[in-house]
Amino acid sequence: MKRGLFITFEGADGSGKTTQLNNVKMFLEEKGYSVIVTREPGALDIGQKIRDILLHHKGVVADRCEMFLFLADRAQHVETYIKPALEQGKIVLCDRHTDSTIAYQGYGRGQDISLLKELNKIAVKGLKPDLTLLYDVSTETAQQRVGSEKDRMESAGIDFHRKVRNGYIELQKEEPNRIKLINANNSIETVFEDTKDIIIKLLQEK
């Protein structure tokens, strides 16, 4: 059986990446592909508990604790869910993955980026996305879209989110063949057309 495809969706909260992920799911299913949708953190039972801590814990969460919680969730997710699905030939669409850790904990929180990259490698055991779609939107627009009801990560402040956005852009420059930058300031329809063009090209190449 042919291995499936692993596509990740990245960007700031409020970038519209989750909306586009759902659009891609419908597009691929209409073409007859077997698709599963997942997310990080919080795809599985263990992950759901970790997600609750990361997004809603009222006390202090140390930066390194936050980092290891994300990595623990990823290790479980990849081993028990993503890899088996790919081996079954499915297309896996994942809302956030390794690049989020580098952007948020590395560039945003100021953790050692080289160390984070090495820890990510351990967590995923060699798995890498076939394609990463990065939805870039101005920090001010993203914050407006999120609204007033913010979780712990969304409430980190505009300077933090500017650092995250800059981090994502740096990652795209490092891996332009894998990470495709999409202007998410545009309308949902325009962004989806840009997304669809990239997805179609990937399918033709594979």
Image: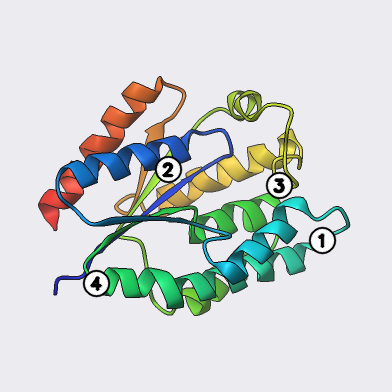
Asked if 2 appears above or below 102 in the picture, the reply is: below
Q: Amino acid at mark 3?
A: Met
Foreground pick, 112 / 194:
194
Q: How is the image coloured?
A: rainbow
Foreground pick, 14 / 36:
36
Residue designated by label 2: 134
* Quadrant of the frame with the C terminus: bottom left
* Disc 1 residue crowd, few under 14, some 14–19, many 20+, Cα 10 Å: few
Residue designated by label 1: 61
Q: Secondary structure at mark 4?
A: loop
Q: CA distance from mark 3 to mark 2?
A: 19 Å
Residue designated by label 3: 153
Name which residue lies at 50% across and 61% down.
98
Q: Amino acid at mark 2?
A: Leu
Mark in front: 1 vs 4? 4
Q: CA distance from mark 1 to mark 4?
A: 38 Å
Q: Secondary structure at mark 2?
A: strand
* Disc 2 residue crowd, few under 14, some 14–19, many 20+, Cα 10 Å: many
Name which residue lies at 29% across and 69% down.
86
The reply to whether callout 1 and callout 4 are in contact (CB within 8 Å) is no
User: In the picture provided, is 134 more to the left or to the right than 60?
Assistant: left
Q: Amino acid at mark 1?
A: Val
Say which label, 2 or 1, has the lower sequence index.
1
Q: CA distance from mark 2 to mark 1?
A: 27 Å
Q: CA distance from mark 2 to mark 4?
A: 26 Å
Check the image and name the residue furthest to the left: 204
* Disc 4 residue crowd, few under 14, some 14–19, many 20+, Cα 10 Å: few
Q: CA distance from mark 4 to mark 3?
A: 34 Å
Asked if 84 appears above or below 145 in the picture, the reply is: below
Say which label, 3 or 2, has the lower sequence index.
2
